[in-house]
Amino acid sequence: MTVAEPEMPASERRLVALARWDALIFLYYGIVWVGTAASNAKVIARGALGEVEGSAVLAAASWLSHHSLIFAAVFTPVALILVGATGVRSAYNTRKDIKEPPKTLHQVAQMMLKDPVIVGALVLLVFLPLISHEDLVVGLLPVKESQREHVRSVLRDVGSLGVSAVFCFIMLPTTVLRQWRMK
């Protein structure tokens, strides 16, 4: 005679299911962080070592950055759906502490500028043109032709370092903490 194992209560099953989805969300955040940190390490290694053929550090950072960001790009639609569902679930579960919405544009701007993710996104707007428009900037500079490629490389590296640093150390940690605190 075998004894049937007691069935898990519905509330516990729900918590286990939610923990699985949260684990996927945090895995995604971890992969994105590793990819951007490896990209940052690649820029630093290239600056320190130069364009050295066969550099193990440069090759490892390039490989890790490339593969983790490709995986993150493929997984992004699923992660966005999971994060959205978690946000809806959190808003649904915590209706008692809803704040009054801002009434004026000035109040909206003040509220947004208190958010580190929004401030980080605004800082990114400073660095992104250095990456994407370095040709335009270098074309306007009064430097010799031999120095243009060096200036272009420096602008691209500064832009990449700025974007990676803001994303790795401000935006992503803030987002992860918010996700962690959602009930």
Image (cartoon, rainbow, N blue to C red):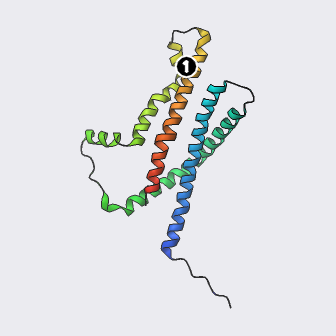
Name the amino acid type tagged 1: Asp
Quadrant housing the C terminus:
bottom left
Q: Residues within 10 Å of mark 1 (few under 14, many from 20)?
A: some
Image: 8 above or below 88: below
Image: 19 above or below 70: below
Residue appearing at x 72%, y 34% in the figure: 56
The answer to which of 166 and 149 lies nearer the viewer is 166
User: Residue 122's quadrant in the figure?
Assistant: top left
How many tags in the picture?
1
Residue 132 x, y percent position in the rendering: 53, 26
Side (left or right) of 22 relative to 118: right
The answer to which of 58 and 19 lies nearer the viewer is 58
Residue appearing at x 66%, y 35% in the figure: 62
User: Residue 33's quadrant in the figure?
Assistant: top right
The answer to which of 127 and 70 lies nearer the viewer is 127
Residue 110 x, y percent position in the rendering: 30, 40
Residue that protrudes farthest toward the front in the picture? 48
Residue appearing at x 54%, y 48% in the figure: 29
Mark 1 = which residue? 135
Residue that protrudes farthest toward the left in the picture? 103
Residue 49 x, y percent position in the rendering: 67, 26
Residue appearing at x 57%, y 19% in the figure: 152
User: Residue 40's quadrant in the figure?
Assistant: top right
Residue 61 x, y percent position in the rendering: 66, 36
Quadrant housing the N terminus:
bottom right
| Element type at mark 1 | helix
Residue that protrudes farthest toward the bottom in the picture? 1
